[in-house]
Amino acid sequence: GSSEYSKHQMCYTWKHLRQVLGMQEFYRNDKVGIVGGITHIFQLHPTGSKMRIAVGLYDTSVSPEVTIGTSEIDFYGLTHGSSTCRNPEYRDVFFRWNPEVGDIGPHRLEARAASWAGEPDRSDNTARMTFLIEPNDWATEVRGDPWDMTEATSSPPAWYTDDISSMYGWTASAYTDSVSGMFEGTVNRRHLDDNRMYLNLNSEEIDGDSYHYFSLIAKTQQNCDVYLGWKDSNNNTGEEEIGELSSNWGRTPVADLSTEWQGRCITELWLSFRLGGLESMPVRVGWVRLLNGEL
């Protein structure tokens, strides 16, 4: 008791006990879609009170750094008896952060507390953490269901998943469901250059100015080119080659359609797997993503 008391009798050094990382509340807005908070817990070993101590959270990933939030906290000191030790005081500070599309990517954050005259050690007044802001996926955020090829739970279509609304140029008898969460079908040999897999938009429109980074992971029995086609709200159509696939699982490069979709509202979206051959072609698709930013 008495030795512990004397040890901390003159100690005013900050101790950053822990950082509670991760979004505590989630809301949706027109940009990145997340409003969140980071709670930082400050600890002090006091023998007396200290009021209006400045604390803050800062993003040091950019120059000049960005102030996310500031606050002030008070410590009142703890009473003790002749046979009891002093215990540290704790204060929670909640910093609200509203990331936007331009914030997508990694961020180096620092939580800091101001020092004051007589503080014996000012080297531990800062705690550092890394935070990753990921882009939003259109199907998850707007449609309310990602294009992850999960099987339909009731009244499934012939191709087993509601993530696809209709098919053209595929062999009707060749759809299978041997692996959960995966589309499995075969392009008919008569439609190797004009087949279509229509993605289910659930009657929603895609804002081409916001969401225009497209990719998918899939495999095909033979090497083939993958095309993405679309129709907009003015009934204009277009298509773009977005990559190649082979018999090995692969992800197409992220296609940036910002130029093609500028000012457009997309009302239909389809994939086409094209092969310059004569045989039918089995295709498997794991997931499809349309993002509002790129990591």
Image (spheres, rainbow, N blue to C red):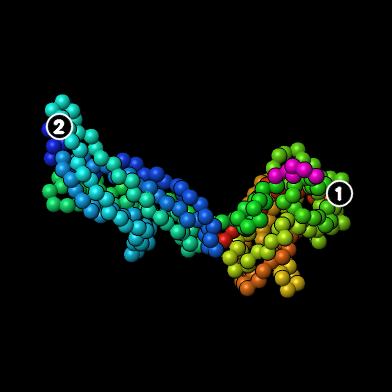
Q: So how many labels did they put on this image?
A: 2
Identify the main secondary structure in magenta: loop
Q: Is residue 173 visible?
A: yes
Residue that appears at 80% across and 44% down: 155
Amino acid type, mark 1: Ala
- Is 115 colored magenta in this rendering? no
Identify residue for label 1: 172
> How far from the left and from the top, in percent, is residue 183?
74, 46
SS class of the residue under badge 2? helix
> How far from the left and from the top, in percent, is residue 77?
19, 41
Q: Is residue 240 visible?
A: no
Above or below residue 15? Residue 26 is below
Residues in magenta? 150-155
SS class of the residue under badge 1? helix
Identify residue for label 2: 5
Residue that appears at 31% across and 40% down: 17
State yes or no: discs 2 and 1 in contact (Cβ < 8 Å).
no
Q: Nearer the viewer, residue 83 or 195?
A: 83
Residue that appears at 35% across and 58% down: 69
Q: Quick check: 235 left or right of 211? A: right
Amino acid type, mark 2: Tyr
CA–CA distance between discs 2 and 1? 80 Å
Q: Can you tell which of label 2 and label 1 is closer to the viewer?
A: 2
The quarter of the picture where residue 192 lies is: bottom right
